[in-house]
Amino acid sequence: MKLLRQENAQITFKGASFNLIGVDYQRERTPRGQRQQTLARLQPLVRRDMINILLSHNPNTFNRAAELGVELSLAGHTHGGQIQVEILDHRLSPARFITDYIAGLYQRPLFAPAPNERAASNASPTRASSPSLFALSSPPMAHIYVNRGLGTVGAPVRLGVPPEISLIVLRRA
């Protein structure tokens, strides 16, 4: 098995191909606290002749990946927020302070400029409701699935966030 660290590999199965891209953990700030662009070296790895799938531990890479033309991103990192409380129809989690992408499937326009700051985002993410990711849509959409995972970070507590193992089935269009 080969680790994809700032690398890509073309995967072909039963005559269909996609471009699988893997990146190391992407930090938004340097050790000195300065902002840095996530996925700074991703653009040469994105292919225009096939679907691109990004494997990234950190879901905060999604805005930049969508801007560069990555159709599907798969991430974790948040443990689903670990603690989530539902009040009326709102889900509240402390993870919301660090990311818009806590758990589940989200979408945003493909190739749309990535917002500079989460709070000022004009192209805010929306929860995707359709299980068919690549159905024809206008504008075309990029998607991210953030897995809740099995473990925890810090305190070994999960409240309202059950652990998860996901099975994602890719089908040729």
Image (cartoon, grey):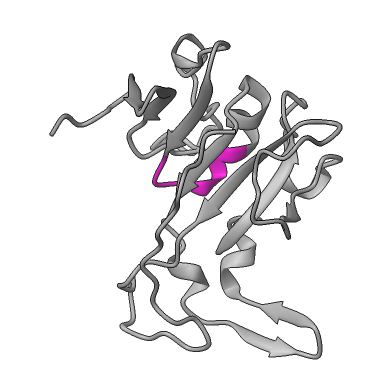
In this rendering, would 16 be left or right of 38?
left
Number of numbered discs visible in the structure rendering: 0
Viewer-proximal residue among 68 and 40: 68
Q: Quadrant of the C terminus?
A: top right
Is residue 110 shown above or below 153? above
In this rendering, would 112 be left or right of 30?
right
Viewer-proximal residue among 50 and 105: 50
Q: Is residue 29 magenta?
A: no
Q: Quadrant of the N terminus?
A: top left
Viewer-proximal residue among 5 and 2: 2
- Which residue is depicted at the point 60% across and 32% down? 71
Is residue 69 shown above or below 145? above
- Which residue is depicted at the point 84% across and 31% down? 139
Residue 10 location, x and y as percent?
A: 35, 19
What segment carries the magenta color? 56-62
Residue 3 location, x and y as percent?
A: 20, 31
- Which residue is depicted at the point 71% across and 56% down? 130
